[in-house]
Image (cartoon, rainbow, N blue to C red):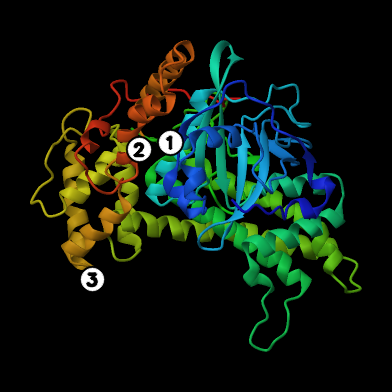
Amino acid sequence: MKFSNTYIDLGEKFFQRSAPQKSPSPELLLWNSELASRLQVPEKLASDHEVLSQYFSGNKQPKGAEPIALAYSGHQFGHFNPQLGDGRAHLLGEVLDSNDVRRDIQLKGSGQTAFSRRGDGKCALAPALREYIMSEAMFALGVPTSRCLAVVSTGELIHRGLAKAGAVVTRVAASHIRVGTFQYFAARGDITSLNVLLDYSIERHFPEITRSDMDSTSPSREQCILGFLEKTIAKQITLVVEWLRVGFIHGVMNTDNTAISGETIDFGPCAMLGIYHENAVFSSIDEYGRYAFASQAKIAQWNMARLADCLLPLLIEADQSDHDNKEQQALAKVETLVVDFTAKFERAYDEMYAAKLGLAQVNATNKHLVKDLLALMQTHALDYTLTFAQLTKQINNARLLAVDVWVNELPSELEGWFKQWQLAIDKSVFSRQEAQALMQKNNPVVIPRNHHVETILAHCEEAVSDCLNQNSLDAFTVINNIVSEFLQVLCSPYQELEATKSYQDKPEDGDQYYQTFCGT
């Protein structure tokens, strides 16, 4: 792997140099061969499990890697912490993938850093596997996301109330620049570093901002700053709309978990929506429902407002006029972009649900159809994924057939809605066949349901424990035997494989008592 380290070039204020802690007995458990190919990992390396376990546990450093822990701040559940940083992660460096796109390679659970805040810096096996499974599922669903290259067991026990097997997961991301990275320097009044970070972020994620236009004039500094905010907002809108499309609840949308790249990052207390409820919350640490399913857009907008706060000093500095009210003018400019979030999100939201229902356009009638369907789903406790999947299948039926999607019998109101929906499709420019094809692209037939994820994780924990106790067991083979079918199904979420039906069932309790945890 050909590492480069452009983030290090930004200067010592942006990170702390930190080496991963040694693992006593690392063993490769999962290896993402498809992603490895994209990252141009040499075949010889990709087939050597012993070497992979050493590199991706942190015991040895790949040539060219320079491990660092990144500095950042963050609003956590609305409360600002001026110094967070990577407390259990090490950025090894960056590689160019097969499309010449720069990707961060980061170890997570690799030990203490200067930012650990009394934590042990380690990761338990289950959260490492959860990140691998969920990020691969999200990628297959078409949601912008970081991904995982490897999971390595460390051969040690860590204490999370109970003794748990330790693991290191290797995360691959477009970058690890967060809203909290900008907050880190804004909180310190470090305008110089803010400018450096902005320039780097634009060059890495939005290079089109600084390209000359047709009359060969370069954009002004103000245009670059506002262009960056506008494009970052657009990325967040796309991300949240995709979350809502597939029923994903992030669970901890703090500003330190909000990537400038617009990728899903940090899968600690995430969950999938089963029974539809707009206020669904599964995260054990989200006591007041701040990050509930339907609140995610509002929070994304709030997070973008915090990014705008950080950019205000740069706008004021860029204003070369003699006006006395530079602050008010700068505030008005960023406020316009943040306020516009609402209209842009609503437009993208309406277009997304129109596609899920096979509707050719967004209009008042179709928006009411979406609103009425979601209300019926909530009133009658209908499953989100299975309802849309059944509508896709039954689009040509004369009447809606009762199948094992509904908790009790088919709600009579849904039959009436079904007729109105078919009428709306028949009045549109789409044929039923075209509408169904659009729905099939937007409505998965399977998702990583919470109870299946937990069952897989429990089996993996038990298997790794057995492997620790019996050195003769091949942990890689054992774990892959457990997860391979599940991952194969999740990687084909829009088509029904032979094994798909094994992972479509609803939990017996409807996830009524399900909780997710941070995993730290």
- Tags 3 and 1 in contact by the CB under 8 Å rule? no
- Tags 2 and 1 in contact by the CB under 8 Å rule? yes
Q: Secondary structure at mark 3?
A: loop
Q: Which of disc 1 and disc 3 is earlier in sequence?
A: 1
Q: Nearer the viewer, residue 60 or 133?
A: 60
Measuring 70% from the left and 61% from the top, which residue is drawn there?
334
Name the kind of residue labelled 1 in the image: Ile
Q: Which of disc 3 and disc 2 is earlier in sequence?
A: 3
Q: Is residue 165 left or right of residue 87?
A: left
Name the kind of residue labelled 3 in the image: Val
The alpha-carbon separation of the residues under discs 2 and 3 comes to: 38 Å
Q: Which of disc 1 and disc 2 is earlier in sequence?
A: 1
Q: Is residue 221 left or right of residue 406?
A: right
Label disc, if present, on residue 133 of the rendered structure: 1
Q: Secondary structure at mark 2?
A: helix
Is residue 417 at all visible to an observer of this figure?
A: no
Name the kind of residue labelled 2 in the image: Leu
